[in-house]
Image (cartoon, rainbow, N blue to C red):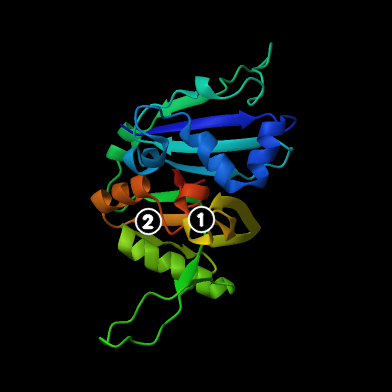
Amino acid sequence: MTYISRLALNPRSREVQHDLADCQSLHRTILSGFRDVPTSEAREHFAILFRLEPTRNGEVIVLVQSQARPDWSSLRPGYLLPRPASGAVVDNPAVKEVGSVYARLTSGAALAFRLLANPTKRLSTAPDDQGRRPPGRRVELQREEDQLAWLARKGKQGGFDLLAARAGRSVPDVRTVPGGKITGRRNDPHLAGLPGMLTFGAILFEGRLRVTDGDLFRTTLQRGIGSGKAYGFGLLSIAPPS
């Protein structure tokens, strides 16, 4: 089964502020909701993906997708905003099963989507003595046309096409919004115990797509798109087109 959790974080919480400034710390907090396996294995075991949602009113919303129902009772007191005492009552955290919705997706379905991604490419390297080329380092794609081409390739591999904009058949109906840098620190064993910096370029994609292969698309929804999935990238959210 597949679940989506919606967490409204308390921006006044020092723990929240620390997590928002350090993607590794936020990663650990998210994994704390899955305690059936060691934390180091939880993300892959439960196919956990998450994203900080863009908001206009100062809210801090995190969406978490997983293949097991999480237990958010492990979050520290005050980490989440309290549920309103009156008016429109919204559970916080809210957890919804979406696997049944994914199961009904078929080829040809048109959908709106949102994706926060880290579009990159690997630099080419010189061959070694055996003629093998070691993998080059990843670099960010800076130009919008390269970012859109990256997403189009991921779509071909993942069972969907980007729909064309109404104004031009060769232009994808996708908006790109630069999300700045997402940073954090982790202990890197190759640095003799010194903290290693994590830095990712973030691009928010929003637009329309068409499913070309239902089974492959469901796998893409579950596994995510691109690199940096442990740090808030790769969650493909879908909805009926407006």
Which residue appears at 44% of the width and 45% of the height?
238
Where is 99 relative to 128, above or below? above
Residue at mark 1: 188
Where is 96 relative to 194, above or below? above
Tell me whether the residue at label 1 lies in contact with that at label 2, contact meaning CB atoms closer than 8 angstroms.
no
**Front position in the image: 169 or 142:** 142
Q: Nearer the viewer, mark 1 or mark 2?
A: 1
Q: 10 Å neighbourhood of mark 2: few (<14), some, or many (≥20)?
A: many
Q: Is residue 100 left or right of residue 171?
A: left
Of pointers 1 and 2, the one earlier in the residue sequence: 1
Q: Quadrant of the N terminus?
A: top left
Which residue appears at 35% of the width and 30% of the height?
68
Residue 35 at x, y percent in the picture: 40, 27
Q: Is residue 176 visible?
A: yes
**Front position in the image: 5 or 79:** 79
Residue at mark 2: 210
**Front position in the image: 68 or 89:** 68
- Secondary structure, mark 1, is loop
Where is 72 relative to 164, above or below? above
Mark 1–mark 2 Cα distance, whole angstroms, equals: 41 Å
Picture mark count = 2
Disc 1 residue type (three-letter):
Asp
Which residue appears at 29% of the width and 49% of the height?
219
Q: 10 Å neighbourhood of mark 1: few (<14), some, or many (≥20)?
A: few
Q: Is residue 214 left or right of residue 35?
A: left
